[in-house]
Image (cartoon, rainbow, N blue to C red):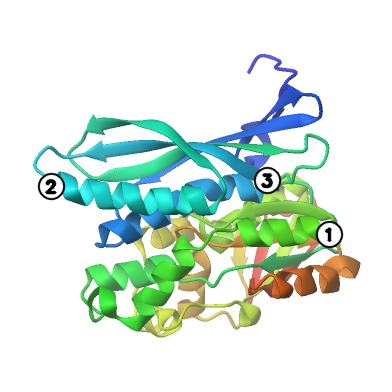
């Protein structure tokens, strides 16, 4: 790619969003994401898709400024359903403190919705994916298992969308990661690296963070927060298609240690939708970070740490049972 001096973060380093120098001590954060429905309720789908797209800005330590709707819609489908999707998305845009500035729609054989988001961040202190240090600990701010629960819904293993397990999952997916970002910034916690856990699952995103940082991550699966019912469904054999593909493709990069059960592995590789932030901080900053998150009403769990990596070792993540 040609040299672009104003591009502070781009495709290199597994970054969640692009960061462009805007002058006068300001930088823009640019990102986009959209996907087909993960739940049947159109309002909830809009909330979840918008929260997912906005999350990349928060994962860079920034604030959202504006968003554009991105829509694919079949001609035969009721436009009132589309209105519900867009209303759900607008709720989250407004909650994030951003404005809806327009959008674009196309005819499509399948419903798709998401956002193109512009945010703002300090160009000297935004959070990269690849800045972790040896000895850093990993914090996770949402429970895992969203796609396993969505898969169970499709397989009619839940009691519809009124099932408390699915309601909890929808609420988690629709919850903005803005609260975690603001809490850490206001507490002046030095975040060495950060990403949001989405389609690559916890295993895949921790691998990107470790590889980009030149380190090896150890994930202690006994400490993982999980959505209600997710582990039992995984024990019963439920796994998302994306999770299956990720696990099959892991190879030597992600090693499943002794004591890791098959059910927990399904959770770790689950292709999450609008998951929490995965945050690397120094051990001596952990207590401050946990206190700041707790006071902001953000649940968090310490799920792993970073070690030096032997360059000859292809493993970048070890999953400990």
When asked about the image quadrant of residue 13, the answer is top right
Q: Which residue is under mark 1?
A: 189
Q: CA distance from mark 2 to mark 1?
A: 47 Å
Quadrant placement of the C terminus: bottom right
Front residue of 27 and 191: 27
Dot 1 crowding, Cα within 10 Å, few <14, some 14–19, many 20+: some
Residue at 67 percent across and 62 percent down: it is: 180
Whether residue 100 sits left or right of residue 156 in the image: it is: right
- Determine whether label 3 and label 1 are within 8 Å by CB: no
Quadrant placement of the N terminus: top right
Residue 119 image offset from top left, x and y in percent: 61, 38
Q: Please give the label number shown on residue 60.
A: 3
Front residue of 43 and 8: 43
Q: Which residue is under mark 2?
A: 78
Q: CA distance from mark 3 to mark 2?
A: 37 Å
Residue at 39 percent across and 65 percent down: it is: 147
When asked about the image quadrant of residue 120, the answer is top right
Whether residue 201 sits left or right of residue 189 in the image: it is: left
For label 2, the SS is loop
Dot 2 crowding, Cα within 10 Å, few <14, some 14–19, many 20+: few
């Amino acid at each position: 790619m040609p040299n672009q001096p104003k591009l502070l973060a781009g495709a290199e380093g597994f970054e969640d969003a692009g960061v462009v120098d805007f002058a006068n001590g300001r930088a823009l954060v640019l990102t986009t994401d959209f996907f087909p429905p993960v739940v049947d309720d159109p309002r909830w789908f809009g909330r979840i898709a918008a929260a997912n797209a906005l999350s990349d800005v928060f994962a860079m330590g920034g604030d959202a400024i504006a968003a554009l709707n991105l829509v694919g819609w079949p001609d035969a489908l009721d436009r009132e359903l589309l209105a519900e999707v867009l209303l759900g998305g607008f709720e989250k845009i407004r909650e994030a403190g951003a404005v809806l500035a327009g959008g674009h729609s196309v005819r499509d054989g399948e419903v798709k919705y998401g956002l193109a988001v512009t945010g703002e961040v300090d160009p000297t202190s935004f959070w990269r994916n690849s800045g972790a240090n040896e000895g850093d600990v990993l914090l996770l701010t949402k429970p895992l298992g969203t796609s396993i629960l969505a898969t169970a819904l499709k397989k009619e293993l839940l009691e519809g969308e009124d099932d408390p397990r699915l309601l909890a999952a929808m609420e988690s997916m629709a919850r903005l990661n803005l609260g975690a970002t603001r809490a850490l910034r206001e507490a002046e916690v030095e975040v060495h690296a950060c990403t949001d856990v989405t389609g690559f699952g916890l295993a895949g995103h921790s691998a990107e963070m470790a590889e980009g940082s030149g380190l090896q991550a150890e994930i202690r699966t006994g400490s993982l927060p999980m959505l209600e019912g997710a582990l039992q469904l995984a024990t019963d054999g439920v796994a998302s298609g994306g999770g299956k593909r990720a696990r099959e493709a892991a190879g030597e990069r992600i090693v499943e240690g002794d004591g890791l059960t098959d059910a927990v592995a399904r959770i770790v590789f689950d292709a999450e939708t609008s998951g929490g932030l995965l945050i690397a901080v120094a051990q001596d900053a952990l207590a401050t970070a946990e206190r700041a998150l707790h006071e902001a009403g953000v649940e968090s769990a310490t799920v792993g740490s970073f070690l030096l990596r032997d360059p000859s070792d292809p493993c970048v993540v070890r999953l400990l049972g």
